[in-house]
Image (spheres, rainbow, N blue to C red):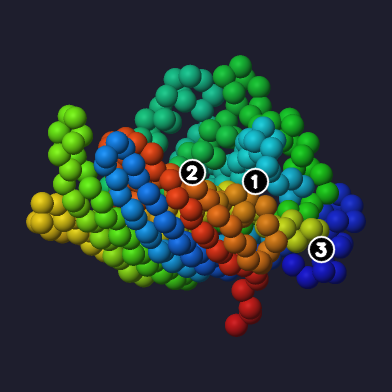
């Protein structure tokens, strides 16, 4: 939003409403690039292994805002406030949808029997999606709006008084959501090797050497890229120029795993997921961050690199992670 317009929208309640009515849709591109380098050791009695992993991920995807400045942050760091804000925001969106549809085919449920009927319709619509993620996401949005708008069981109007009070403050936040058909790109690459000795007898003494190698590199197929369009939502504070993301999603690298045991290799194709510790670290950084920047850090790698936590014992080792990100307006064509 242009600075002059933003200042006018913050000037008073009447101008806020006028700006909200005339606000134009905005679009921004989210870019995240993450690299991981980890080392790990495992010990359980005489059993042991050493492993290493290198991973690199990048995504580019676009999100849209209706351009209306909101008085509260949909991704508020306080979970109670966030719930109240989300409930009231969904109620208002539901009312807008009902007005646009002229009442639509879905009537707001007012009794327990009507709520049960709408729930059954939601289940049927979800079943008819046949597992399509975009269809299922649309069903969730549609029925969430219906239930957020409907009166509560005691007949009182839906919505949160606390959420309404927060959203009705002078506008400063822009809400961004993914949309179907957004242009995006994704890249994922992973190399992991674990070598050691393991026992299959109860006493844990008959040690057998093993090697596990995993390699994958992919840029996602049509379904992956279509799904990425719906993965993210974001909030921008137009006063402090701060970005808020809920969780970081990065694609898995499609590749192969080769496990050699008793000198016999066994190979299979599979999706090789990013390290959970790295995703948690990235999510913590981007929960509240500058609109663009970079960061680096370390974490303790306690998740087994071979994915097998049933062997017990102690897993540990250092993980290093670096990340660059930006969430900036898309240039006009």
Residue located 86% across and 49% down the image? 13
> Looking at this view, is 41 or 302 the one in front?
41
Label 2 neighbour load within 10 Å: few <14, some 14-19, many 20+: some
The answer to which of marks 1 and 3 sits earlier in the sequence is: 3
Q: Is residue 227 above or below residue 91?
A: below
Residue 210 placed where, x, y %? 20, 52
Label 1 neighbour load within 10 Å: few <14, some 14-19, many 20+: many
Element on which disc 1 rests: loop
> Which residue sits furthest bottom?
333
**Which quadrant of the figure contains the C terminus?**
bottom right
Q: Is residue 284 above or below residue 63?
A: above
Is 271 left or right of 81, judged from the image as shown? left
Element on which disc 3 rests: helix
Please give the residue where the numbered disc 3 appears in the rendered image: 6
Element on which disc 2 rests: helix
Residue 265 placed where, x, y %? 12, 58
> Looking at this view, is 14 or 288 the one in front?
288
Q: Name the disc covering residue 75, or none.
A: 1
Is 97 left or right of 290, judged from the image as shown? left
Label 3 neighbour load within 10 Å: few <14, some 14-19, many 20+: some
Residue contact at pointers 1 and 3, CB within 8 angstroms: no
- Alpha-carbon distance for marks 3 and 2? 31 Å
Residue 3 placed where, x, y %? 82, 69
> Looking at this view, is 283 or 99 the one in front?
283
Q: Name the disc covering residue 142, or none.
A: 2
């Amino acid at each position: 939003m242009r600075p002059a317009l933003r200042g006018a929208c913050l000037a008073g309640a009447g101008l806020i409403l006028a700006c909200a009515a005339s606000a134009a849709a905005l679009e921004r591109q989210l870019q995240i690039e993450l690299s991981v380098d980890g080392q790990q050791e495992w010990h359980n009695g005489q059993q042991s292994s050493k492993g290493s992993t290198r991973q690199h991920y990048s995504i580019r995807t676009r999100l849209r805002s209706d351009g209306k400045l909101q008085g509260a942050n949909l991704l508020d760091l306080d979970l109670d406030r966030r719930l109240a804000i989300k409930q009231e925001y969904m109620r208002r969106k539901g009312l807008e949808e009902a007005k646009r549809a002229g009442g639509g085919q879905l009537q707001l449920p007012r009794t327990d029997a009507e709520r049960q009927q709408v729930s059954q319709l939601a289940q049927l619509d979800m079943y008819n999606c046949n597992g399509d993620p975009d269809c299922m996401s649309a069903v969730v949005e549609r029925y969430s709006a219906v239930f957020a708008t409907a009166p509560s069981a005691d007949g009182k109007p839906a919505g949160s008084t606390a959420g309404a009070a927060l959203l009705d403050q002078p506008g400063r936040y822009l809400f961004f959501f993914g949309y179907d058909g957004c242009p995006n790109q994704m890249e994922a690459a992973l190399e992991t090797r674990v070598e050691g000795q393991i026992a299959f007898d109860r006493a844990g003494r008959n040690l057998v050497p093993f090697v596990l190698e995993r390699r994958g590199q992919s840029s996602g197929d049509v379904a992956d890229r279509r799904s990425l369009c719906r993965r993210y939502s974001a909030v921008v504070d137009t006063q402090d120029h701060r970005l808020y993301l809920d969780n970081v999603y990065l694609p898995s690298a499609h590749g192969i795993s080769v496990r050699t045991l008793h000198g016999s290799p066994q190979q299979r194709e599979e999706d090789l997921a990013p390290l959970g510790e790295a995703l948690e670290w990235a999510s913590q950084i981007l929960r509240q961050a500058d609109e663009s920047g970079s960061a680096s850090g370390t974490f303790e790698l306690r998740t087994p690199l071979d994915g097998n936590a049933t062997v017990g014992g102690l897993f540990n080792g250092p993980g290093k992670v670096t990340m660059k990100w930006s969430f900036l307006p898309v240039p006009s064509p």
